[in-house]
Image (cartoon, grey):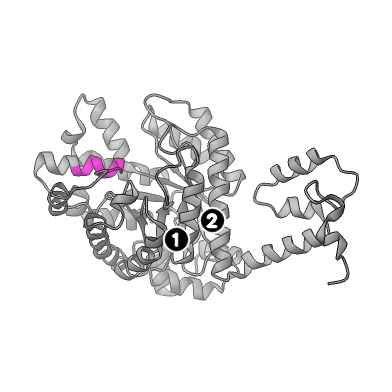
Amino acid sequence: MTQKSEAQKGNITPEMEFVADKENIDVNKLAKLIDKGLIVIPKNINGHSKPCGIGEGLKTKINANIGSSSKIDDIDLEINKAKLAQEYGADALMDLSTGSDLTLFRRKIMDAVDLCIGTVPIYEAGVITLNKNKEIIDMDPDDIFKAIENQAKEGVDFMTLHCGITKDLVQKLKATKRMMGIVSRGGTFLASWINHNDMENPLYENYNYLLELAYEYDITLSLGDGLRPGCLADASDIPQIQELVNLGTLVKRAQDANVQVMVEGPGHMPLNQIKANMEIQKTICHGAPFYVLGPLVTDIAPGYDHITGAIGGAIAATYGASFLCYVTPAEHLSLPSLEDVKEGVIASKIAAEAADVAKGLPQAWDRELKMAKARKEFDWESQFDLALDKSKPRTYRDKCELDDDEMCAMCGEYCAVKIAKGDF
């Protein structure tokens, strides 16, 4: 069974009840939206994560990426990142590890947090391939499906799978003068494999088998954008859109099979293209929830890409994206530190809140009105409690060392709110 198959039967699951209560939505309405494929609740039947609803009419959700690599393989550090991401409001966590003992790492992460857990199984298949002293282009397709099934048994809730990169599309990409080529790691694995072996993408060719696995464990498919633009110059080009068309077909097949599915999106993109991309995705992909990285709206801010991503994320979520993958200040530069994880989550939470306000979500407006009231009344404790980062504003306030609670260091005795208090 899946959440979608139960919704189709008119059955209300405990996960639906949990999400409906948290989102303040009628549970029967929620079930109908799940049945239509407009909302997903990534929740593996073997997992113990807290249910998280993603999609139409719900709060914009945030994902944080963590993971070890062959160069930096510190499990304790990554676990601390996971805990920090949860503390600052992430709704989901993706383990992108390519280091040693990936099974142990996933188990420790799942034990450390109760967030929705996602992976990219082809990374593990790549590690297995290299451990056999083979090249990625010689990867055995069976290892990809073994990784998917093993992770499903472990309790992974959603998986990024680059099913839309086809043999035909790889040939077209070779003829395209792209500035950055392919920047998706999973996308590169598959495109290079297809090109070397002159064979079809095994995830595309064996999609029915993938759907069977997803249905058995209620894995939410996150159809990956392997050809997402890696710079502004490549945004909205033919390969990106053609892959999206392929994904739209695969979304329909998943929905018809009662498998939960969402779609991943760009990447790097100018501000003026974001709205159209969100609308195109919703049309082509039958309303499936859209999961975006950023989009990053400029390429010239290394060290500040949590900001460029938050700007794009706010616009994307306003016009249809339901799920934002955080971007940290370390993007394009290094593995993120603990502080980078915090900054990335907070930046994405700001973007999500801005979009939810723009969409008129009652819960978002309730928080905004409470903050306005607290500021008017100089209620500092309420302001700190309502803040996305509860410690930073308190630190700034304490540094002021003011003996009057009804002023800040900037305006002092000329505080507009204090002067006009009670008059307007």
Crowding near pointer 2: few (<14 within 10 Å), some, many (20+)? many
Q: Main secondary structure of the magenta part?
A: helix
* Disc 2, SS: helix
Residue 404: x %, y % from top left? 90, 48
Disc 1 to disc 2: CB gap under 8 Å: no
Please state the extent of the stretch shown in magenta in the rendering: 182-191
Residue nearer the viewer, 346 or 112 = 346
Q: In which image quadrant can residue 397 be found?
A: top right
- The tag on residue 316 is 1
Residue 185 is a magenta residue? yes
- The tag on residue 216 is none
Looking at the picture, does residue 346 appear above or below residue 240? above
Image quadrant holding the C terminus, namely bottom right
In the picture as drawn, the residue positioned furthest to the left comes out as 198
**Residue type at numbered disc 2:** Ala
Q: In which image quadrant can residue 396 be found?
A: top right
Residue indicated by mark 2:
351
Measured in 3D between alpha carbons, the distance from the residue under mark 1 to the one under mark 2, in whole angstroms, is 9 Å
Image quadrant holding the N terminus, namely bottom left
Looking at the picture, does residue 30 appear above or below residue 91? below
* Disc 1, SS: helix
Residue shown at the point (58%, 71%) measured from the top left: 360
Q: In which image quadrant can residue 83 be found?
A: top right
Q: Is residue 295 left or right of residue 144?
A: right
**Residue type at numbered disc 1:** Ala
Residue 263: x %, y % from top left? 35, 58
Q: Is residue 53 left or right of residue 205?
A: right
Looking at the picture, does residue 191 appear above or below residue 382? above
Residue 126: x %, y % from top left? 27, 34
Residue 302 is a magenta residue? no
Q: Earlier in the sequence, mark 1 or mark 2?
A: 1
Residue shown at the point (51%, 75%) measured from the top left: 28
